[in-house]
Amino acid sequence: MVSRLNQLTNQIASGDGDDDDVGKRDTIRWDGWGYDDTFFHIIPNTDLIRVSGHRYDVSGLTMPNLLPFMKSRGVSQTATANDVVDINQVAIPFSVSNDDFVASLPASIIVDLSPACRIRHSHGHSLQEIYNLRKGLVERVPDSVAYVNSESDVKELISRATQHSVVLIPFGGGTSVSQALKCNPNESRHICSVDLSQMNSVLWVDKENLTAEVQCGAIGPEIERVLSQNGLCLGHEPDSHEFSTLGGWIATRASGMKKNAYGNIEDIVLRITCITPSGVLEEFGRCPRQSTGPDIKQLVLGSEGILGIITSAVLRVRPLPVSTEYASLIFPDFASGVAFMRQVSRQRVAPASIRLVDNEQFQFGNAIKPEEKRSWVNARFQDSFRKWIITKLGYDLKQIVACTILFEGNSSEIRRQKWRILSIGWEFGGRSAGSDAGRRGYRLTFLIAYIRDFTLSLGLLAESFETSVEWDRVVSLCDNVKKRIKQSCDDAGALIPPFISCRVTQVYDTGACIYFYFGLVPDGVDNPVEAFTKIEHEARQEVLRSGGSLSHHHGVGQIRKQFMGQVTSAASLSLLKAVKRQVDPSNVFAVGNLVD
């Protein structure tokens, strides 16, 4: 059986829709991000990069400035996007069979033992995982993949796994970047990956009370499609929205780009059903709030698969917004932009999404701008705009930053929001850069992972990581982390300076989320992946030293687990371990995340 993420889901796309609809979801790449018909490639004998496929705004268009930008940062054109191995050529080093377990499962649970399926379920999307896959290097992979269709299937699977001493690893969309799906190479038991993609239904919608119950395997577009047919939306839109699942959002305490309007996942979830080896973790009722002791669902939020399998959740939903508009601002420097963001937060006028990118990311954004038909009118306008920035405003093109904004609501609400935001921006030197730049900046988010995989094919090792920090430390944290990465790259022998950029992506009363992008050109570096991992580790340590959190929304997984003692007290970790032992005494869910 092939996962639903690798089938054409025509049944979802039977209604009306545009090219963004989930029904366009045919096949998912096994060794990289996203659809296998969407990738960046260099047009032979040119410096032009084209995006294949038809799913995105830039699909089929060329980017004349991206490759020159990359070359200016030291990336050489030495490989092609197809320089990877075939999945059928990847050798699995060993397997642990458990025929009794497989034979004991009911007919409703389909088990796939094929090497290709097992490899697909063995990884997330960290740089290290994708690099190894493209080299055909795998260590331990699941010994089987079980497809469950219902809550009763999940209960039966857990019971049989306990009985036959089997490890279960929940698998949703496979979009983790924290190595949360990595199998323990020293595990002697049979490992079964539990694919939840068949549990993808919206079970019911209550339009009167604005709630809905959704199964854990549903991905973002599937949820929004059904809700929109009822005039509603969820509004939770992480960067991985196209491929990640509700269960994954809950398990990692996810955050979305429109959290200002809709909240983080913990604000959206009203009730969770989680099946453990010791029984069901669940609170009854659909009340908006309860005062009945500690909130059980908070144990499940962020549990990263170590307690059991999340099967469904009751969610708060909202009416569909009447209108959506984009805007953008430019500021003379990063500090001015951060001060603007802080003031927006203080006045509590943040629109659905508001994000600030530093100068390096601003230049990168311009580099990936698709080629346009450059009429003389358009050319004169762009040249005039550039001169206006330099001469009239006096801004340094090597210092300016940009803010992209998304407004939602009715026309009068958006008009009021826009006036307030632009007025605050003016106080801090912000000037409007138009709606097109805002739209392009927001939509770019869905392409970043594709670009990461493309640059990997050219030899650049790149990854993102995030944190949250108080307002008065935002600028200093960004500066400190950038300096740390540069120094770590020098220490590793790198001959070319690294690519480092950051953006402020979510705002709170007390602080903000900061998202970093880091790229290492490995020239001069011995054992580049090992060096990259060390540099990444040192960058995270600098984040903590500078007052940042270990993670804002990616979760801990296995890649950050070693830092948990620095951010959580010993008593708190002991409590988490005690809960784990209580609900999973046989360690069926030996996923290896959060704690040992």
Image: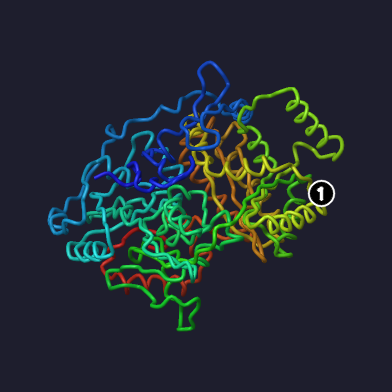
Residue 155 image offset from top left, x and y in percent: 25, 66
Please name the residue shown 31% across and 62% down the image: 589
Q: Quadrant of the N terminus?
A: top left
Residue 305 image offset from top left, x and y in percent: 37, 61
Total marks shown come to 1
Side of 184 where 402 appears, left or right = right
Which residue is label 1 attached to?
Answer: 429
Please name the residue shown 67% across and 36% down the image: 363
Q: Quadrant of the C terminus?
A: bottom left
Mark 1: which secondary structure?
A: loop
As drawn, which residue projects farthest toward the right? 392
Q: State the residue in front, 468 or 289.
A: 289
The amino acid type, in three-letter code, at marker 1 is: Gly
Side of 560 where 143 appears, left or right = left
Residue 380 image offset from top left, x and y in percent: 78, 26
Vertical placement of 482 versus 566: above or below? Answer: above
Please name the residue shown 67% across and 40% down the image: 436
Side of 164 where 212 appears, left or right = right
Vertical placement of 387 versus 118: above or below? Answer: above
Q: In the figure, residue 262 lies in which quadrant?
A: bottom right
Side of 469 where 148 appears, left or right = left
Vertical placement of 392 versus 325: above or below? Answer: above
Q: State the residue in front, 386 or 337.
A: 386
Residue 403 image offset from top left, x and y in percent: 69, 47
Please name the residue shown 63% across and 43% down the image: 439
Q: State the residue in front, 200 or 490.
A: 200
